[in-house]
Amino acid sequence: MRPTALITGASRGLGAAIARELAESHDLLLGARSADSLADVEADIPTARPWVVDLTDADAVANAVADVERLDVLVHNAGVAELSSVADSSIEQWRNTFDANVFAVVELTRLLLPRLRDSGGHVVVINSGAGLRANAGWSSYAASKFALRAFADALRLEEPRIRVTSIFPGRIDTDMQRAIVAREGRDYDPDEFLTPATVARAVRNAIDTPRDAHPTEIVLRPIAR
């Protein structure tokens, strides 16, 4: 029986790249807010199954998790990045950021722990360079990623049968990155950033690491050009 992997935020960008990277070795559940958004990825991976749910809706997540009978790999990729200074941010921005980047991850993991314990599974948390160093204008996002790192660290100690890997990529060439660069008022040059395929390969390498090792953290940075 092939292992099963659930990837959140799988409709595009990094999540879609991770799905394509794992398709040959895993049965996939593709997490997304809408079925329509998964059309391109499903066309590439016809054996994958859509797993459609709003991760910030705890009741909907509980219902969706009931259909997951087995799970070997959980990849937390979904998230948001709304940037502003502390002075210009609102409490709603902070709440929305933590709902998507922290609380949704915590609740989905909590609900799936019985399946992950049964399989001796692997949780991969896509963090960010902002989870290691906070920059001006990134306060709510960086705070959520620091919290995400703490969650992964605690989970790793609490669940010795489960491997937990935090991945801290630098900026990635995605639609989210284009929006961030536009907000920064700069021209977009994809060569400045990591490709989704490169980060997806790091995810696969972590999952493929032999069981005598626990890949706890992976840090990736674009090569300076």
Image: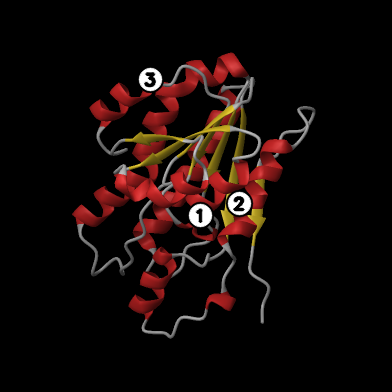
**Above or below, 195 relative to 181:** above
Say left or right for 11 vs 36: right
The percent coordinates of residue 111 (x first, y second) are 40, 22
Q: Residue 14 carries which label?
A: 1
Q: Which mark is residue 191?
A: none
Evaluate if marks 2 and 1 touch, with contact meaning CB atoms under 8 Å apart: yes
- Taking depth in this image into account, of 33 and 153 the one nearest to the observer is 33
The percent coordinates of residue 140 (x first, y second) are 34, 57
Mark 1 nearby-residue class (10 Å; few <14, some 14–19, many ≥20): many
Type of the residue with mark 3: Asp
The percent coordinates of residue 152 (x first, y second) are 53, 37
Q: Distance between the residues labelled 2 and 3?
A: 26 Å
Q: How is the image coloured?
A: secondary structure
The percent coordinates of residue 7 (x first, y second) are 48, 39
- Taking depth in this image into account, of 139 and 169 the one nearest to the observer is 169
Mark 3 nearby-residue class (10 Å; few <14, some 14–19, many ≥20): few
**Above or below, 148 relative to 70:** below
Name the residue beneath numbered marker 2.
200
Splitting the image into 4 quarters, where does residue 124 fall? top right
The answer to which of marks 2 and 3 sits earlier in the sequence is 3
Name the residue beneath numbered marker 3.
67
